[in-house]
Amino acid sequence: MIPWLDQQTLVFPPINTALADPNGLLAVGGDLSPDRLIAAYRQGIFPWFSDEEPILWWSPSPRCVLKPADLHISKSLAKFIKKTSMTLSIDQQFDQVINACAQLRKDQEGSWITEHMQQAYQHLFDRGVAHSVEVWQGQHLVGGLYGLAIGNVFFGESMFSRESNASKLAFYHLVQHLSKLGFTLIDCQVHSEHLQSLGASEISRDEFQAYLSNIDTDLADKPSLWHKYTAP
């Protein structure tokens, strides 16, 4: 039986009780309040569900992660980064980025970024916990990503691209910025060929938890650092 969360507390079941099939399903219910979401991510738990489902909470193993130093840039991508006329910004259009991510998923496979989810992460953005990277072609938003910064770990959520390489460009600049801020790990949640091509790898749930147990709380209290972004 999958436990239902108590609406009155922020307590989650131990993550080692998550199911193996489906991989990582831990709990059901609760809400998407900022405090619950932050408590979840601090433990390596995230929500993932569709409109017709209750809130489902996950902690899969293995976990797909990327250490900033392991970022892999192919020769073709390096050439693109050097020559592109696209420009970057951070935290300028969070609502547009998350909406674009939701629309892309809806077109391709059915979106888990529901309207309720968008509102929840907007609240986290307002609190300086969620962040976005925007890629521009002139005045047009052509790519981007968003996620949560908690301590020295960045929890990636979703990315989108309307032009070739736009999401890779966003990810590249995110990693450069995180490196400057002293972040040690980017959580990519689950494996994909796209993420692997950028240097992501898989680690066990226990190893992932070891990173979370050493979160640098000093960084967690400095969301203003995100507004000091300069392109490398």
Image (cartoon, rainbow, N blue to C red):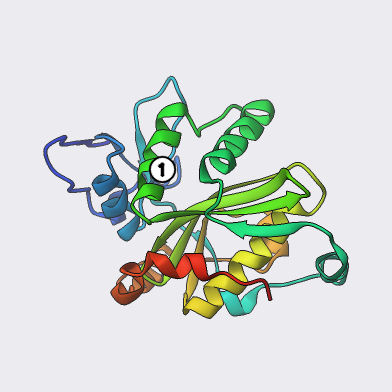
Nearer to me, 155 or 85: 85
Q: Residue furthest left?
A: 8
Q: How many marks?
A: 1
Nearer to me, 175 or 139: 139
Of the 4 image quadrants, the one containing the N terminus is top left
Q: Residue furthest top?
A: 52
In the rendered image, the vertical position of residue 92 relative to residue 33, given as above or below: below
Mark 1: secondary structure: helix
Picture quadrant of residue 215 = bottom left
Q: Position of residue 192 (x, y in %)?
A: 65, 52
In the rendered image, the vertical position of residue 136 relative to residue 150, given as above or below: above
Picture quadrant of residue 44 = bottom left
In the rendered image, the vertical position of residue 68 relative to residue 114, given as above or below: below
Going by the image, does 100 lie left or right of 9? Answer: right
Q: Residue at x 35, y 32 (%)?
A: 55
Tag 1: residue type?
A: Tyr
Q: Residue at x 82, y 49 (%)?
A: 164
**Does residue 8 appear anywhere in the picture?**
yes
Q: Position of residue 134 (x, y in %)?
A: 63, 52
Nearer to me, 107 or 231: 231
Q: Which residue is disc 1 drawn over? A: 121
Of the 4 image quadrants, the one containing the C terminus is bottom right
